[in-house]
Image (cartoon, rainbow, N blue to C red):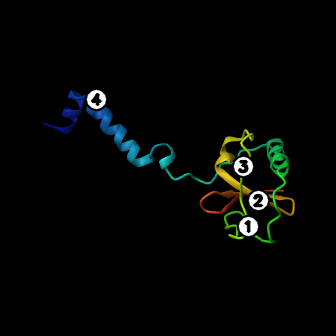
Amino acid sequence: MKRSDTNNRHPAKASLSTGLLLVLLFGVGSSVAQPAVEFRWTSTIERGVYNRVTQEGVRTPPRFSVTVGEKIPTAVELYDVPSDIEYAPLRRYRYTVRDDRLYIVGSDTRKVVRIIN
């Protein structure tokens, strides 16, 4: 019996096999490694997030110099994004503020994913 004949006789098995293959290839939910945050912001949204986060009055960290993709030094304290910020992709990151710049940082990696002036 050909394999295609078996799948035609048991469409549920074929669907299950296809579903399992897709799960293995693409993963499911939060178990999949998350790509860098996709910031599709307008300047208005970006300014609103900057204004809200800088109201928090966080301690000024020691001087550091990093660009997007680099790690924030471990001596720099990172803060949770305020829960009232409605921009969902931002909530899984942390931040710090230095020299009027807002650094959005990966929670686990400490890598800068966005800098807002």
What's the CA distance linking mark 1 and mark 3?
16 Å
Tell me if 99 is positioned left or right of 104 in this view: right
Q: Which numbered disc flags the more N-terminal residue, 3 or 4?
A: 4
Residue 115: % across, % down: 77, 58
- Element carrying mark 2: strand
What's the CA distance linking mark 2 and mark 3?
9 Å
Q: Residue at x 30, y 38 (%)?
A: 17
Would you identify the image quadrant in which residue 11 lies? Answer: top left
- Element carrying mark 3: loop
Q: Which numbered disc flags the more N-terminal residue, 2 or 3?
A: 3
Query: What amino acid type is highlighted by mark number 3?
Result: Val
Callout 1 crowding tier (Cα within 10 Å): few <14, some 14–19, many ≥20:
some
Callout 4 crowding tier (Cα within 10 Å): few <14, some 14–19, many ≥20:
few
Q: Which numbered disc flags the more N-terminal residue, 1 or 4?
A: 4
Q: Which numbered disc flags the more N-terminal residue, 1 or 2?
A: 1
Would you identify the image quadrant in which residue 108 lies? Answer: bottom right
Q: Residue at x 22, y 35 (%)?
A: 4
The reply to whether the C-beta atoms of the residues labelled 3 and 4 are less than 8 Å apart is no
> Mark 1 highlights which residue?
76
Q: Which numbered disc flags the more N-terminal residue, 1 or 3?
A: 1
The reply to whether the C-beta atoms of the residues labelled 1 and 3 are less than 8 Å apart is no
Query: What amino acid type is highlighted by mark number 4?
Result: Ala
Residue 63 sits above or below residue 83 on the image: below
| Mark carried by residue 56 | none
Query: What amino acid type is highlighted by mark number 1?
Result: Val
- Element carrying mark 4: helix
Residue 86 sits above or below residue 26 on the image: above
The reply to whether the C-beta atoms of the residues labelled 1 and 2 are less than 8 Å apart is yes
> Mark 2 highlights which residue?
96
> Mark 4 highlights which residue?
12
